[in-house]
Image: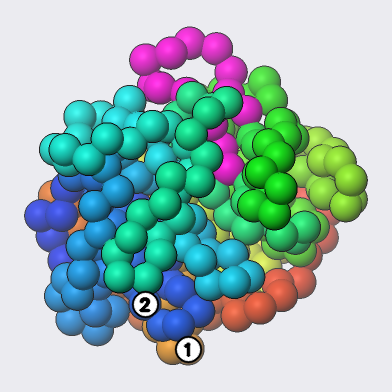
Amino acid sequence: MPDIRLLTSGAGFTEGPLWTSDGRLLVTSVSRGQVLELDHRTGAVVRRVETGGGPNGLAEDEHGRVWVAQNGGSVRRSSSHRPAAAGLQTLLGGGTVLDALTAGVRAPNDLVRGPDGRIWFTDPGSPHEEGPGQVFAYDPRDGRLEVVAEGIGFPNGLAFCGDRLIVAATRERRLLGYTWDGASLRFDGVLAVLPGGPDGLAFDADGRLYAALPDADRIAVFDTDGTPLAPIRFPDGTFPTNLCFAGPARDTLVVTAAKGGRVLALDGVATGPRHLVPPPTTARTHHA
């Protein structure tokens, strides 16, 4: 098992790690309504950006803009005094926050840039709401918002590998597989049934999938054909929520651990994708 380094702690309910194209490590503090920039070597806080509400997932588009999945503070109490509606935000230079999408959604959770250039995001609604959630695709060029998948029990993390999309269905404890053909999204089936509800997802450069399981204190790992590999285990009470590959060589796995407001780093696990990631082969359903 790789060594686990503590980058920072006491940062609130940590989520949404992102390594940007210009070499910055960002994480969100859902409970404080902030995006934090950390030194990826020491964990020191370089900058705090007040988004308000409950910022959760982060993603970068092809222009280098950072997008924020903003739940509007409906998931947990936020200590921020900046008003923020549920929707999508972008972070501009100098710490400016732009509320890009503020209508038509309930509580966006996580997001990713899709192969079509749109911002794809999950919207499970508040944890206190019953009923299924949706996956949306938002086009920054014309402001169009499209429902691309629905009927999912609390859709949470999501990740693309080529034209293959994986969505974490937290309430169902499943990973769902889809294929994007350039015009529509096809459901391919259940990739895995897990011992806990999955949260954040990430692919490495070889197409292996990593799924954070907060309640199980582990990261489930799957080979390109969906076969379960040895999980990455953490001490009890870690509560890993999300993950990304960071560092100049993308060879550090950064994990947000919400218990204690921590951000952890693991070296030597794998290397993350730089540009295009080869799509995995068709996967069967597995139990992890």
Mark 2 → mark 1, Cα distance in angstroms: 13 Å
Q: Where is residue 255? Give x, y as percent.
A: 34, 61
Q: Where is residue 73? Give x, y as percent.
A: 30, 31
Magenta-tinted stretch:
121-134
Horizontally, residue 26 falls left or right of residue 57, namely left
Asked whether 260 or 50 is in front, the reply is 50
The mark nearer the N terminus, 2 or 1, is 2
**Magenta span: chief secondary structure:** loop
Query: Looking at the picture, does residue 79 appear above or below residue 14?
Result: above
Horizontally, residue 61 falls left or right of residue 230, namely right
Q: Quadrant of residue 162?
A: bottom right
Q: Where is residue 30? Give x, y as percent.
A: 27, 43
Residue 140 in sight in this render? yes
Asked whether 162 or 98 is in front, the reply is 98
Q: Quadrant of residue 256?
A: bottom left
Q: Which residue is mark 1?
A: 249
Asked whether 61 or 143 is in front, the reply is 143
Amino acid marked by disc 1: Ala
Residue at horizontal 43%, vertical 45%? 99
